[in-house]
Image (spheres, rainbow, N blue to C red):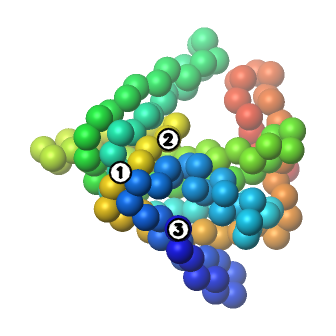
């Protein structure tokens, strides 16, 4: 990963083969220690996406093998019980230009992965919401 720091944000570029969420977690451990918000584009392969079912309060995961355009990734990085939580959603497109989206569990960079990262001025923690079963920002 390479990055450049500006006054109020970073530009990140992940390299071929790097794990998307894992790399963002490491970036926060080393640079943006309060977490932040990010948005980006690129290309991914061997993706695992998830969909949350509010009835069961569980995620269902699906694996997508092969190369995909990353039309958009948006997310935040917060803290839950002192653990870094990368919460990202993405829209992927296949070679037939068919798109699909979901919660990004993990994927490998395949070509490019470029992000704008806006660090939080202080740590934002998450709490487990009993009603939904989700880890939500504790503001």
- Contact between marks 2 and 1 (CB within 8 A): the answer is no
Residue at 64% x, 78% y is 9
Residue at 50% x, 52% y is 20
Identify the disc placed on residue 108.
Answer: none
Identify the disc placed on residue 106.
Answer: 2
Q: Could you say whether the residue bearing mark 1 is in a helix, strand or loop?
A: strand
How many residues crowd mark 2 within 10 Å: few (<14), some (14–19), many (20+)?
some
- Contact between marks 3 and 2 (CB within 8 A): the answer is no
Q: Nearer the viewer, residue 77 or 133?
A: 77
Visible in this render: residue 102? yes
54 left or right, relative to 28? left
| Above or below: residue 38 compared with residue 21 | below
120 left or right, relative to 49? right
Residue at mark 1: 44
Q: Position of residue 86 (x, y in %)?
A: 64, 47
Quarter of the image for residue 6 reads bottom right
Residue sticking out furthest to the front: 17
Front tag of 3 and 1: 3
- Mark pair 3, 2: CA separation: 16 Å
Q: Earlier in the sequence, mark 3 or mark 2?
A: 3
Residue at mark 3: 1
């Amino acid at each position: 990963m390479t990055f450049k720091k500006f006054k109020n944000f970073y530009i990140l570029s992940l390299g071929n083969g790097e794990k998307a969420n894992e790399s963002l977690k490491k970036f926060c451990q080393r640079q943006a220690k309060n977490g932040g918000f990010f948005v980006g584009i690129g290309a991914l392969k061997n993706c695992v996406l998830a969909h949350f079912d509010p009835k069961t309060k569980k995620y269902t995961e699906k694996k997508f093998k092969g190369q995909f355009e990353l039309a958009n990734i948006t997310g935040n990085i917060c803290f839950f019980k002192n653990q870094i939580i990368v919460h990202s959603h993405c829209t992927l497109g296949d070679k037939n230009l068919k798109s699909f989206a979901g919660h990004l569990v993990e994927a490998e960079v395949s070509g490019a992965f470029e992000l704008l990262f806006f660090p939080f001025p202080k740590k934002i923690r998450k709490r487990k919401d009993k009603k939904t079963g989700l880890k939500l920002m504790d503001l």
